Structure formats: structure tokens, C-alpha cells
Image (cartoon, helix red, strand yellow):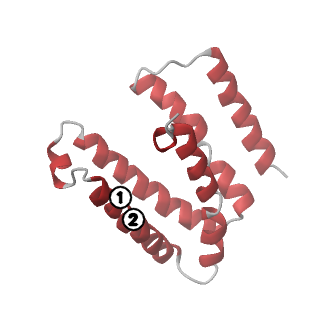
Amino acid sequence: MNLTSSYLLWAAVALAAYTFVPVFTKAATDGIPSNTVAFWANAILAVLALGVVLVSDDPIVGALDHPKAPYMLAGGLCLAVGIISYYRALSLGPVSIVVPVFGLFLVTSPLVGAVLLDEPLTLRKAAGVVIALVGVYLATSG
């Protein structure tokens, strides 16, 4: 197995890194406005992503002419709204509540994917969605 192309490896790295995002964000927004924290955190993301694109010789400007570019831009807009809102929520509420509610995208994304991308929503996946909902309820309730 080629580890650099393994989606499970990349997902595990993302999990490990993202585990600390709400903790560091909550700590930062205890003294810095959430919009400022969102800007600087995502500036780091933009610079690192640019570096990866340049090293991998992927297209930057040319991607804007691709037929799928509107989806790329819509995803960026959704990401911006979601992250700015997430940082604001973390600045106002406890990590133990904000993160599970934010994490409901684990429930909503597969459902949207099934509808808009014709991805299969099997009984097993539907059961996982229900279990995730129960988990969020248990994690956020008193």
C-alpha cells in the first residue's frame, strides 16, 4: 500500500491535527476576537496550501476555468462561513458542547451526499447516522 495515497492515513492525520483545533481556538479566543483568530489560523492554512500546490505543480489559476470550479468556489464559501461561525461559537461556548454540535456535519454531509451526489445510503450507513445523532445528544446533554 502506498502510504502517501492512502485516504485512511490522510484521514487519520486530519483527525490527529483537527483534534487540537477547538482546544487551541478556544484558548486563543479567550483574549483575541474570534474573527481575528479565524483570519490568522486560515492565513496559515492558505499559505501552507499554496506551498503544497506549488510543490506538487498543481494548477492554481487554471483551475478557475475548470467546469467544476463553481463547486470549488461554493465549497470555499461554505468553508469560510462554517469556520468563522465555528470560531465564534467556540469563543462563546464550551468546547464540550460546540464541537459535538459542529460535528453533526458527520450526519448531514452523508445525507446531502446521498441526495446530491447519488452516493449510496445503505442501512448500515443510516444506522451510523442515527448512532452519531445519539452520541451528539449524549455528549451535549447535562
Q: Position of residue 42 (x, y in %)?
A: 43, 67
Residue beneath disc 1: 52
Q: CA distance from mark 2 to mark 1?
A: 6 Å
Q: Secondary structure at mark 2?
A: helix
The residue pinned by badge 2 equals 48
Q: Front-most of 138 and 75? A: 75
Up/down of 83 relative to 139, above or below: below
In this image, 86 relative to 78: left or right?
right
**For the residue carrying disc 2, how many other residues have a C-alpha within 10 Å: few (<14), some (14-19), or many (20+)?**
few
User: Neighbour class for label 1 at 10 Å: few (<14), some, many (≥20)?
Assistant: few
Mark 2 and mark 1 in contact? Answer it, CB < 8 Å: yes
- Residue 43: which quarter of the image? bottom left
Instruction: Determine whether 142 is above or below 106 in the image.
Output: below
- Which image quadrant for residue 133? top right
Task: Give residue 23's position: percent from left, percent from top.
Answer: 67, 67
Depth check, front residue: 93 or 21? 21
Name the side, left or right, on which 93 lies relative to 85. right
Query: Where does the image place residue 46, in percent across and percent down from the top left?
Result: 36, 64
User: 102 or 59: nearer the eye?
Assistant: 59
